[in-house]
Image (tube, grey):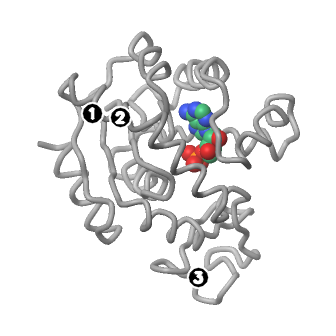
Amino acid sequence: MKLVLIGAPAAGKGTQAARLVEHYGIAHISTGDMLREEVAKGTELGNQAKSIMAAGGLVSDELIIAIVQERIKKDDCAKGFILDGFPRTVVQAEKLEDMVKLDHVVYISAPDEVMLERLTARESCPKCGATYNKLFLPAKVAGVCDKCGEALTQRKDDTVEAGKARIATFHEQSEPLVDFYKKKGILFEVDGTQAIDEITKAIIAGLDK
Ligand code: AMP
């Protein structure tokens, strides 16, 4: 199964992707995670992306397309994959058309206020990657990872200011993808304001139809 998850920042793409990957046994491709790894390693690519990401903008189509093109050739993608955070522009979507035939596109929608509130409450573990949200998925001990005991951190772009910029970027650059994929007849929308389990159920029901 080849799948794309679309949604504004903090709509729940990463959380749902992790569950779907487990359910369907396919690869999880998060372009945001890949870029954050490059930033952490201090590579040339990471240095190029760092300030753009911190300001809530998008890295260039050319660069991100090249990364995805390489990534989907890897062995773990043979059974299928979930693209989480790609495409984010119509140019990227058009390029993706040349690379693969998608089975489904899932649009996780939620109002801006909900996403901004969630985004600033997010935390993650720098060691094992577990993610938390102070509003609805808090760590058992505040600020400490349940799984490995490491101190939790906040993404640099999960501030109110960067969050607002990322939501604006979503409306300007990524929302046109909803129409793009609707016209192709492969998109279905899921209400992202529901509880995490309910969203997963709705997505799986839509995919298995
Ligand atoms: P995410 O973790 O998906 O929210 O991505 C974090 C940041 O990485 C975004 O705000 C962008 O700056 C950058 N990024 C991730 N995916 C893409 C993409 N497909 N196109 C351009 N920039 C991206």
Circle number at residue 104: 1
Would you say the beta carbon of the disc 3 residue lies within 8 angstroms of ligand 1? no
Residue 3: mark: 2
How far from the left and from the top, in percent, is residue 24? 33, 45
Residue beneath the point at 57% across and 25% down = 68
Q: Compute the Cα span from label 3 to label 2.
A: 30 Å
Other-residue count near label 2 (Cα within 10 Å), few / some / many at <14 / 14–19 / ≥20: many
- For label 1, the crowd category at 10 Å Cα-Cα, with few meaning under 14, some 14 to 19 and many 20 or more, is some
Picture disc at residue 13: none
Horizontal arrangement in the rendering, residue 131 relative to residue 45 (left or right): left
> Residue 91: horizontal and vertical position, in percent?
48, 18
In the orientation shown, which residue stands out farthest toward the bottom? 141
Hey, what amino acid is under mark 1? His
Label 3 secondary element: loop
Q: In front here: 45 or 207?
A: 45
Q: Residue at x 61, y 79 (%)?
A: 146
Pointer 3 or 1: first along the chain: 1
**Mark 2 falls on what kind of element?**
strand
The amino acid type of the residue labelled 2 equals: Leu
The mark that comes first in sequence, 3 or 2, is: 2
Label 3 close to label 2 by CB (< 8 Å)? no
- Separation (CA) of disc 2 from disc 1: 5 Å
Residue at 79% over, 42% down: 51
Task: Return the disc, 2 or 1, that comes first in the chain's sequence.
Answer: 2
Residue 38 drawn at (x, y percent): 77, 38
Q: Are marks 2 and 1 in contact (CB under 8 Å)?
A: yes
Query: Pointer 3: residues within 10 angstroms few (<14), some, or many (20+)?
Result: some
Residue 69 coordinates in the image, percent (x, y): 56, 18
**125 versus 6 height, above or below:** below
Task: Name the residue beneath numbered marker 3.
Answer: 139
Residue at image x 48%, y 77%?
137
